[in-house]
Image (cartoon, coloured by chain):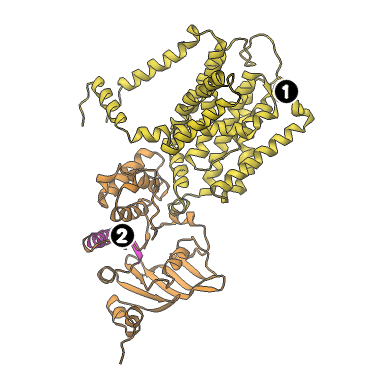
Chain colours: A yellow, B orange
Amino acid sequence: MKKRIGSRQILLLIMLFLVALIPMFIKTPYILSILVMTFYTASASLAWSILGGMTGQISLGHAAFMGLGAYISTLLLMNANFTPWVSIIVVFFVVGGISALLLSPCFHLRGPYFSLVTIAFGEAFRNLLTNWNYAGKGQGLLLPFGDNSLILMRFKSKAPYFYLALVMVILMYLLVKYIDQSKLGYALKTVREDEDTANAIGINPWKYKVIATFISCGLVAVCGVFYASYIRFISPDIMMQDQSVKFVLPAVIGGIGSAIGPLIGAIILTPLSEYLNATLSSIAPGANLLVYAVILIVVILFQPRGIMGWYENSKFKIKLNNWLDKLDGRKKE
Amino acid sequence: MENILEIKELSKNFKGLKAVSDVTFSVEKGAITGLIGSNGAGKTTTFNMISGVLVPSSGKILYNGKDITGLKPYHYTSMGIARTFQIMKPLKHMTVLDNVASGALYGRKGYQSTKQAKEYAEEILQNTGLYDKRYCLPGDMGTPFKKRLELARALATDPELLLLDEVMAGLNPTETDEAVELIRKINEDGTTILLIEHVMRAVASLCKKVVMMHHGEKITEGMPQEVMNDPYVIEIYLGKEES
């Protein structure tokens, strides 16, 4: 089968182009900030999905690794004038290494027991930073303000952050997609499905869990670098366990185990929670969370494999594909 | 003929229970050897020790003259040993093709690209009669096909010695005959096979040698006809005739 540029690729490029044009037309910082947070959540969720979705090790401590990334890059910036761009590389290897080392003895735990350990590690890091003078204790750290500077990843308007986040989410998606289709991806998915089978075909489950942890936690730390540069204030609160859940939910709602699932989940969930927050919390405080929770429960109850799980088995997919093939002028084989 | 696998005085205790005790037998290179016995005889435990899932309490396993006792199971693939599971363990959320491609990627063929691995997997699927089902999920297929999938995935690792744990259980007579043909074909292509089986018809037509186990011990071994006509074996399977 020859590959050629068809309607799918063209449609995708048009969509990307339209998204890239958004800051030209929408100047409201509030809307832009929601979009930035959407991209950021999607990136973190994609990073999480390498360990949680592909390898099936549900981590509930990823916010701590994200926070570690944010802290390391901020401390490097404030004390050594390190540019966040270099921090990205440093943080990937340092946090990836730390998490792989810490979690490596825990991979013999299965299912919820592994998740509990990750919660414990998350809390441990949060407590460490809450009590550490050098890292600003519980008050957190304020990143230095100043003029726009690309090198320091510091901008006064939202638009540059929008593009940074957009590039980040695209790269993250392409990376996850690549791993999904690679030899490594097959090993990770085999480990997720059945460890005995993995053993029987020559895959060492422990080794591949360590590799997945390294990549996943390293990447989520990179998201942390972006977070710190964007919010410009970090405190141990960003490592709270409910923040970890924010990375898990888009993947669960979008569809665990597919590369595009976390992306779709984040695009739906982040604006939804913002919208509910804006409209409902003025009427009754907390009502937004209630409605949000109900929506989540309904989706998980009726569509446990997420939106992508529904799409893969739906008539909509067949219709969409037929329509796209028609656009290409291709005949159905 | 030389022996590809030699089991020497193999024992396994689960706390106080002796599941397997002092079992000794060998598997001839290029032949099909059967391991038979009633339920709970310790056949699968022996299998799990041979494939590295369980560590023997005592005894030795020699593969091509090399001591492999106690090695981790994931080392076995590169040595050329593959196994299937009695209780089928398909990769549920992956297509049949991907199931087999996984085996091809990490087996002895050493493919680096998934494309090559998939091509090889398609070849295997054609040989095992699963090609039409390659885009199915294992859960959507019936037992005979799942059993075949187990076999195909093990074959994809390009083994020298194939351990089959009851691949014919739950198949009807026609399907059993097809499975027998398939196993014979695999053997004729040069793969040595050690199989656990309850279907005596299949064992008799396939195996060159049969090892009979009972209560964790080896009772007898020999040609299928000899073993099956052994009065003690008949007694174990059918009970004692009242005189």
The residue that appears at 61% across and 44% down in the rendered structure is: A116
In terms of depth relative to the viewer, which is nearer, A187 or B88?
Answer: B88
Q: Is residue A296 above or below residue A40?
A: below
* Tag 2: amino acid: Gly
Range shown magenta: B175-196
Horizontal side, residue A29 vs residue A124: left or right:
left
The residue tagged 2 is B190
The residue that appears at 55% across and 11% down in the rendered structure is: A159
Q: Is residue A303 visible?
A: no
Task: Give the position of the N terminus of chain B as an image quadrant.
Answer: bottom left
Q: What is the chain identity of the residue bearing mark 2?
A: B
Looking at the image, the residue that sits furthest to the bottom is B243
Marks 2/1: CA–CA distance: 68 Å
Q: What is the chain identity of the residue bearing mark 1?
A: A
The residue tagged 1 is A141
Q: Is residue B5 visible?
A: yes
Residue B178 on image: x %, y %: 23, 59
Residue count near mark 2 (Cα–Cα under 10 Å), binned few <14, some 14–19, many ≥20: some
Q: Is residue A313 above or below residue B230?
A: above
Callout 1 secondary element: strand
